[in-house]
Image: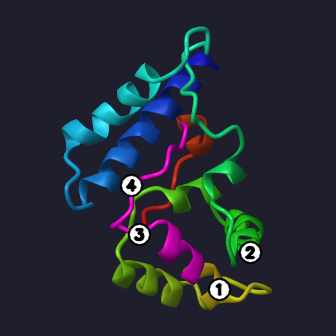
């Protein structure tokens, strides 16, 4: 069981690094330094967890129109936390929206992807997404 958890965290880290590698201004060194910098800012006695680390997957997603639909729809097919990593540009979000037309029923596709495009684009810093939220892996986007 422990080996499985270690392997899942390692795979999640590789996926996160691969997604961030395509983002402008992010190198493998800066991507690797992010977790260390976050844990360095943790208050004493925080048991290694960053002070600003989200407690739940929902905490990764900022409030706004479409947030609830993202949380309630995207997780039906894949790990919803994966949508928050990678910082895709507007054209990539539009392509993903177009590719989800047949998969998203009961949710307003344009509202969902407008929310994702607004909050997780390549012009904003990547959110803190703890590796435990990415267990099970992410579908390549």
Residue identified by numbered label 3: 121
Labelled pair 2, 1 in contact (Cβ < 8 Å): yes
Magenta-colored segment: predominant secondary structure:
loop
Numbered mark located on residue 69 in the image: 2
Q: Which tag is nearer the camera, tag 2 or tag 3?
A: 3
Mark 2, Cα crowd under 10 Å, few <14 / some 14-19 / many 20+, is some
| Sequence-first disc among 2 and 1 | 2
Residue at 69%, 78% in the rendered image: 65
Image x and y of residue 86, in percent = 40, 59
Q: Which element carries disc 4, helix, strand or loop? A: loop
Q: Which tag is nearer the camera, tag 2 or tag 4?
A: 4
Q: Which element carries disc 2, helix, strand or loop? A: helix
Marks 2/3: CA distance?
18 Å
Residue at 69%, 83% in the rendered image: 104
- Asked whether 68 or 5 is in front, the reply is 68
Numbered mark located on residue 111 in the image: 1
| Sequence-first disc among 2 and 3 | 2
The part of the chain drawn in magenta is 114-130
Q: Is residue 125 magenta?
A: yes
Q: Which tag is nearer the camera, tag 1 or tag 4?
A: 4
Numbered mark located on residue 88 in the image: none
Mark 4, Cα crowd under 10 Å, few <14 / some 14-19 / many 20+, is few
Image x and y of residue 15, in percent = 39, 47
**Quadrant of res 51:** top right
Residue 88 sits above or below residue 82 on the image: below
Q: Is residue 12 left or right of residue 44?
A: left
Mark 3, Cα crowd under 10 Å, few <14 / some 14-19 / many 20+, is many
Marks 1/4: CA distance?
22 Å
Residue at 52%, 34% in the rendered image: 8
Residue 136 sits above or below residue 86 on the image: above
Residue identified by numbered label 4: 125
């Amino acid at each position: 069981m422990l080996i499985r958890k270690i392997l899942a965290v390692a795979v999640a880290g590789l996926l996160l690094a691969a997604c961030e590698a395509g983002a402008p201004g992010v190198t493998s060194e800066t991507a690797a330094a992010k977790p260390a910098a976050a844990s360095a800012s943790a208050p004493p006695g925080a048991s290694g967890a960053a002070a600003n680390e989200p407690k739940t997957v929902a905490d990764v997603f900022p409030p706004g129109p479409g947030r609830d639909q993202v949380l309630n729809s995207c997780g039906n097919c894949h790990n919803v936390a994966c949508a928050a990593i990678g910082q895709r540009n507007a054209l990539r979000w539009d392509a993903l929206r177009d590719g989800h037309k047949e998969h998203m029923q009961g949710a307003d596709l344009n509202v969902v992807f407008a929310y994702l495009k607004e909050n997780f684009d390549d012009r904003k810093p990547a959110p803190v997404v703890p590796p435990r939220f990415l267990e099970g892996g992410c579908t390549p986007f």
